[in-house]
Image (cartoon, grey):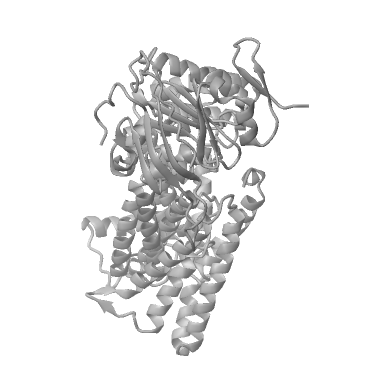
């Protein structure tokens, strides 16, 4: 064994171990650094919130029977404030608005917002700008979990908690762990490998789902297919309440990790050297992302590309800072899916087609553009 | 916790029988990258870690920042066992400039530099708003590294050298006592190589910053480091002043090729060149 040299030298005259950081030389104008401030945060979160409310009101007006804005206003206002008594039994417009259109538009908002925020979180965690719960197979994993629950009668409720979202959550978590394992195996891992792995993972989960539907009772199987295509039809307010509960938990967990996600985009080792407890953050974000994906998929099936295009658009226009990116992407994602669903249910009115058709037709070309974009290739 | 000031004397780091091997999935019998490393690293000095590719230099640097944890042995930072400190405690004392600084998402340079303030704030997941003091610290670091004018530019748009300097500015924004750098001059042109070396020496002389850098540039290390450590196959082969370490016999046995060592015309320090 080689002798062990030491590098100790006599203590320096200077007091060692203490670093003098010189005091600020002169006051710095606060506005001179182009970064996020509380004012900017409130401004942009406020603007996107108002835009989302505006889009919500607009989407309520469109449909097989269009409803004038003033009418929407009086019905909604009257119901919320209780100033105007509406005889729901006799007023068909109020019935359509409050019991059919409003829950559906709200579901689209919740689902779109959640998918966008999951996209943001996955992109940071996997350091991959093309990550999306649909593309990399997380939604398929959730769908497999949900399909097992639906077809094998696990779909019973335990202590009034439906097993459906829980199974979907488990499936999403499984898929997420597989993807993470793949993306962290080996150095120099490229974004394209992750996409290929996503394709294959999607194929495997789809094979399981097809197997399950083929052995299932045909009536159930048909319902399964309709649900898998992505559908926002027929929620009621109690369903929405349950969904909001799941989403709320997931979103709060994600929101608390916004700053850590910023640092994680630098890479895990660098994030650690900057003081991030990487393992803890990863666990929290994994569970939150799986919870959101599981809840969304179990209520509305597989809807693709929202988690891909919305974060990109927000980063392009506003900021890559997750403290701003997460909430704004949430509102914009909600807005995007509300509008997409309005298109899906009005273009062929009174018929409709799955909202996944619209998101794929918009998101697919955007994805291809990003894939071939010069900036994306650099070093990846 | 390390909220008290570090002891005013003694080494920055003390390593005792540190062993590290990268975990492989199925077996754990791979050759260790570092074997029974024992040494102490003085504070307030510039230490250069030299050695051939794959000798364990970068791994050692990552162990010092606790980006990786040793399999065996202990590392003490100013007398505190590194394993007992939180990641933020360490990040307030030690900053790491990694070799690869690729950035995928369009953060601005200023945003990226400000991330250096993260360990100084506490809160849920580190949620905080940077205040004027944070901005002041970041701005001064950016001026030191000649990247202040790039503040609004995107990290994805600037050149590799500019990004490298911005990353060093981020490390200084952590206000560390120890600065670890992995090949800090690898992507820089001559002018900026000299700039970085001078900045590091100025920070060391004026503020007492301990600098530990890994480099393949033996001549830059010779000129700017107080102490050198030559690492080979996970062992420390030699440690001491540039004159002690940059000896032809030692370099030839470690690098496996003939080298010429003469004196630098200005400083008189060893100068290494390859034979024709």
State the residue in front, A218 or A156.
A156
Number of marks in picture: 0
| Residue at image location 25% in from the left, 65% down from the top | A86
Q: Is residue B94 above or below residue A53?
A: above
Q: Quadrant of residue B102?
A: top right
State the residue in front, B135 or A332.
B135
- Residue B115, image x and y in percent? 42, 34
- Residue A241, image x and y in percent? 29, 64
Q: Is residue A71 above or below residue B181?
A: below
Left or right: where does residue B137 sit relative to residue A373?
left
- Residue A98, image x and y in percent? 32, 65
Whether residue A324 is visible to the viewer of this picture, yes or no, is no
The single residue placed furthest to the right in the displayed view is B276
- Residue B51, image x and y in percent? 57, 35
Whether residue A87 is visible to the viewer of this picture, yes or no, is yes
State the residue in front, B149 or A351.
B149
| Residue at image location 58% in from the left, 68% down from the top | A200
The single residue placed furthest to the top in the displayed view is B266
| Residue at image location 49% in from the left, 41% down from the top | B59
Left or right: where does residue B211 sit relative to residue B162?
left
């Amino acid at each position: 064994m080689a002798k062990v040299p030491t590098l100790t030298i006599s203590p320096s005259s200077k007091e060692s171990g203490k670093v003098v950081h010189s005091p600020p030389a002169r006051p710095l104008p606060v506005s001179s650094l182009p970064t996020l401030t509380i004012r900017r945060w409130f401004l942009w979160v406020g603007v996107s919130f108002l835009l989302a409310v505006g889009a919500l009101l607009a989407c309520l007006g469109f449909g097989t029977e269009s409803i004038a804005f003033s009418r929407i206003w009086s019905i909604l206002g009257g119901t919320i404030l209780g100033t105007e008594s509406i005889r729901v039994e006799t007023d068909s417009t109020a019935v359509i608005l409050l019991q059919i259109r409003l829950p559906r538009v709200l579901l689209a908002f919740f689902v779109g917002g959640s998918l966008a925020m999951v996209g943001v979180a996955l992109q940071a965690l996997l350091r991959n700008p093309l990550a999306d719960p649909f593309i990399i197979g997380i939604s398929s994993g959730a769908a497999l979990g949900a399909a097992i629950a639906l077809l094998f009668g696990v779909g019973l409720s335990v202590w009034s908690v439906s097993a459906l979202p829980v199974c979907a959550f488990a499936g999403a978590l499984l898929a997420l762990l597989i993807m993470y394992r793949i993306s962290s195996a080996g150095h120099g891992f490229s974004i394209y490998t992750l996409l290929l792995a996503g394709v294959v993972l999607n194929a495997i989960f789809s094979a399981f789902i097809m197997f399950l539907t083929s052995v299932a009772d045909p009536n159930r199987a048909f319902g399964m297919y309709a649900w898998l295509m992505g559908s926002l039809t027929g929620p009621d307010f109690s369903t929405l309440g349950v969904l909001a509960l799941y989403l709320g938990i997931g979103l709060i967990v994600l929101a608390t990790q916004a700053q850590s996600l910023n640092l994680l985009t630098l890479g895990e080792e660098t994030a650690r050297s900057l003081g991030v407890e990487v393992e803890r953050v990863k666990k929290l974000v994994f569970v939150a992302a799986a919870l959101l994906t599981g809840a969304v998929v179990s209520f509305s099936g597989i809807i693709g590309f929202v988690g891909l295009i919305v974060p990109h658009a927000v980063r392009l226009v506003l900021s890559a800072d997750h403290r701003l990116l997460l909430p704004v992407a949430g509102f914009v994602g909600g807005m995007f899916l509300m509008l997409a669903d309005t298109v899906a249910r009005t273009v062929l009115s009174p018929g409709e087609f799955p909202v996944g058709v619209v998101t794929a037709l918009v998101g697919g070309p955007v994805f291809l553009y990003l894939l071939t974009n010069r900036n994306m290739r650099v070093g990846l | 916790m390390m909220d008290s000031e570090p002891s005013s004397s003694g080494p920055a780091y003390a390593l005792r029988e540190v062993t590290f091997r990268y975990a492989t999935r199925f077996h754990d019998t791979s050759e260790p990258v570092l074997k029974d490393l024992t040494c102490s690293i003085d504070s307030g000095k510039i230490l250069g870690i030299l050695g051939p590719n794959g000798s364990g230099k970068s791994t050692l640097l990552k162990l010092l920042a606790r980006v990786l944890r040793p399999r065996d042995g202990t590392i003490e930072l100013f007398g505190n066992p590194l394993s007992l400190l939180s990641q933020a405690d360490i990040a307030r004392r030690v900053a790491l400039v990694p070799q690869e600084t690729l950035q995928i998402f369009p953060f601005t340079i200023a945003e990226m530099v400000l991330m250096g303030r993260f360990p100084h704030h506490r809160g849920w997941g580190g949620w905080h708003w940077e205040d004027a003091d944070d901005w002041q610290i970041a701005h001064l670091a950016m001026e030191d590294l000649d990247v202040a004018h790039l503040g609004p530019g995107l990290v994805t748009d600037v050149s590799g050298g500019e990004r490298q300097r911005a990353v060093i500015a981020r490390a200084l924004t952590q206000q560390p006592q120890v600065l670890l750098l992995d090949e800090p001059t690898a992507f820089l042109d001559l002018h900026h190589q000299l700039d970085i070396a001078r900045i590091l020496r100025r920070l060391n002389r004026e503020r007492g910053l301990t600098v530990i850098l890994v480099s393949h540039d033996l001549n830059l290390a010779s000129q700017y480091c107080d102490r050198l450590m030559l690492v080979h196959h996970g062992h420390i082969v030699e440690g001491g002043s540039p004159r002690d370490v940059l000896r032809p016999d030692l370099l030839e046995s470690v690098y496996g090729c003939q080298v010429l060592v003469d004196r630098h015309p200005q400083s008189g320090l060893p100068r290494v060149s390859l034979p024709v």
